[in-house]
Image (cartoon, helix red, strand yellow):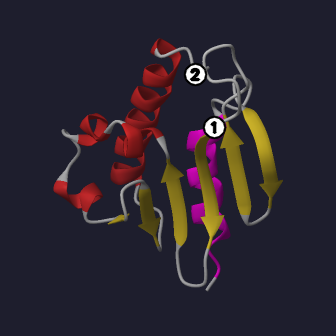
Amino acid sequence: MDNSKTFEKLKSILSQYELQLSILHDKADNYYLNTPTTESNKKAEFFGAVQIKKSYVAFHLMPIYYYPELFDDISQELKNRMQGKSCFNFKDIDDKLFEELTELTKSAFERYKELKKI
């Protein structure tokens, strides 16, 4: 199963923030962003990642683990894609859900900025 197009589409959601975050991995199957080290957090924190797995592509968004109220208003359709508390799984491109994920990622980024983690 070729998940490269789904991976690239999901990566484009996170990569909008790479100039303000730190790239830990940028490979064909693994894209991983951390927060920069700041005065308030003293060390880098995991922000998000996109990874190709055996039969799906995983989109991780760590801020929703710490601040679950960020996804209180997401659709049931997107909630159905969740595995665990901060990971969404996709087998195919779904423009509607990816747009919703784009907004959720923006909210998560803004929350981290408010908390001076970025």
Count of numbered circles in the view: 2
Q: Is residue 15 left or right of residue 109?
A: right
Q: Residue at x 58, y 53 (%)?
A: 9
Residue identifier under label 1: 45
Percent of width and height locating residue 58: 53, 65
Choose between 39 and 51: the one closer to the eye.
39
Choose between 44 and 6: the one closer to the eye.
44
Question: Would you say the residues marked 2 and 1 are in contact, meaning their CB atoms lie under 8 Å apart?
Answer: yes
Residue identifier under label 2: 117
Quarter of the figure with the C terminus: top right
Q: Is residue 37 left or right of residue 80?
A: right
Q: Residues within 10 Å of mark 2 (few under 14, many from 20)?
A: many
Q: Is residue 84 left or right of residue 5?
A: left
Query: Label 1 is placed on what type of residue?
Result: Glu
Quarter of the figure with the N terminus: bottom right
**Dominant SS in magenta:** helix
Percent of width and height locating residue 96: 33, 50
Percent of width and height locating residue 113: 52, 17
Q: Name the mark on residue 111.
A: none
Please give the range of residues in magenta. Answer: 2-15
Q: Is residue 25 above or below residue 109?
A: below
